[in-house]
Image (cartoon, rainbow, N blue to C red):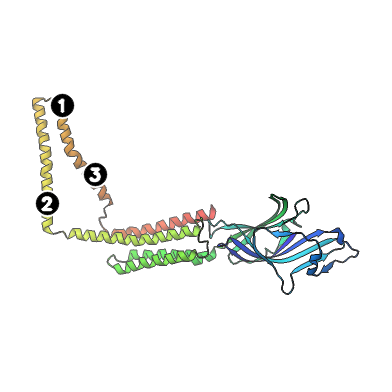
Amino acid sequence: MSLDIASIDTISEINMDYTATIFLRQRWTDERLCFDGNKSLSLDGRLVEMLWVPDTFIVDSKKSFLHDITVENRLIRIYPNGTVLYALRITTTVACSMDLTKYPMDKQTCTLQLESWGYNINDVTFYWTRGNDSVRGLDTLRLAQYTVEDHFTSVSEAVYETGRYPKLVFHFELKRNILYFILETYIPSILLVVLSWVSFWISQSSVPARICIGVTTVLTMTTLMMGARTSLPSANCFIKAIDVYLGICFSFIFGALLEYAVAHFCTLHRLSSKEIPKDEDEEAEEENGVLAAVANSCGAPDNKNNFDSNKSNKTSTDSKRERSKHSGCSSPMSVMKRLSCIFDCFRVKNPYHIDNYARFSFPLSFIIINVFYWIYYLYF
């Protein structure tokens, strides 16, 4: 048996199948058809009904048809030794299980399986006429998104409840061309991320300008993400590489918008703290004086008790009680000081420095993540 791949019309990720037009050629020997002579006989395709032919069918075929313009595209040729050549031109849609985890940097391996329907291995035997060379036409095949990297043939058996049946399998590996996706998806998403960084160089007082850039880039990125999913299955368990990248870009764009929100809030909070009225300052000073008096009053009995303890040599029970009083007064103050130090670490002293940090941190982190992304999906 041999194959000629005339064309692979479509490869659908949504339906997980491919459509191909093939020339299927089968040879077998029927001693009843031997005749005297040196030349072969080419018969009309309508005479097939009068001859024995193998009951070959295409496994996992969703839809197939035999071309019949202008007549049925099949050939019968009989040789003097009884060898019969039976050729068909078929267009078939065959299921192909695809792993889209690395889409669009993925490689897919599809198969074309030919199997006997009713005759088991005791009746007929299938084999490729010339091994891997039995399949031709892939060298001249041109596909829109794929390149045929490798192909090979194999012989196996299909085991069913009714018996064991001969089966021939043709494997071919397809590699997706990523250039289209770089121009269509990756470069526009990178440009959108860079556009969102323009707001870091705009004054924080220009609220409409920075909000407009942030919201526009977020909405544009959302539209780009929705468009990238139109050619893929809507419901599947795959987390595709392109989804990961678009999610990263969306996070950076949304982070740039949140950065301005934080910077603007810190600026307003700083301005409001500077405009506190003098009466409130005086009240705050009075409150601080009261707190200091309370602290002194809390420390005074301790000093007195220490003096009395040194003078009269009180018992150990009284000294423990005094230490507990002293620790009860000082521990809340130390805890408050520690908390205030922690809060000071997270306090933004100059909100205008937030943009300066963002100008450096956002591009650097985006470049690092891109390097890890491409290394992981291209080499692992």
Residue at numbered disc 1: 317
Query: Which residue in the protein does label 3 denote?
Result: 338
Residue that mark 2 sits on: 285
Find residue 186 and report its horizontal and vertical position in percent. Answer: 48, 63
Determine the CA span between mark 3 and mark 2: 22 Å
Q: In the rendered image of this protein, does residue 128 appear above or below residue 336?
A: below
Instruction: Let me know if residue 15 appears in the view.
Output: yes
For the point 54% across and 57% down, the residue is 100
Q: How many marks?
A: 3
Residue 298 picture location, percent across and down: 12, 39
Q: Earlier in the sequence, mark 3 or mark 1?
A: 1
Dot 2 or dot 1: first in sequence order is: 2
Provide residue 216's location: percent of width, then percent of height: 38, 68
Residue furthest right as drawn: 36
Residue 205 is left or right of residue 128, and the answer is left
Q: CA distance from mark 3 to mark 1?
A: 31 Å
Disc 1 marks a residue whose amino acid type is Thr
Amino acid type of disc 3? Answer: Arg
Quarter of the N terminus within the rendering: bottom right
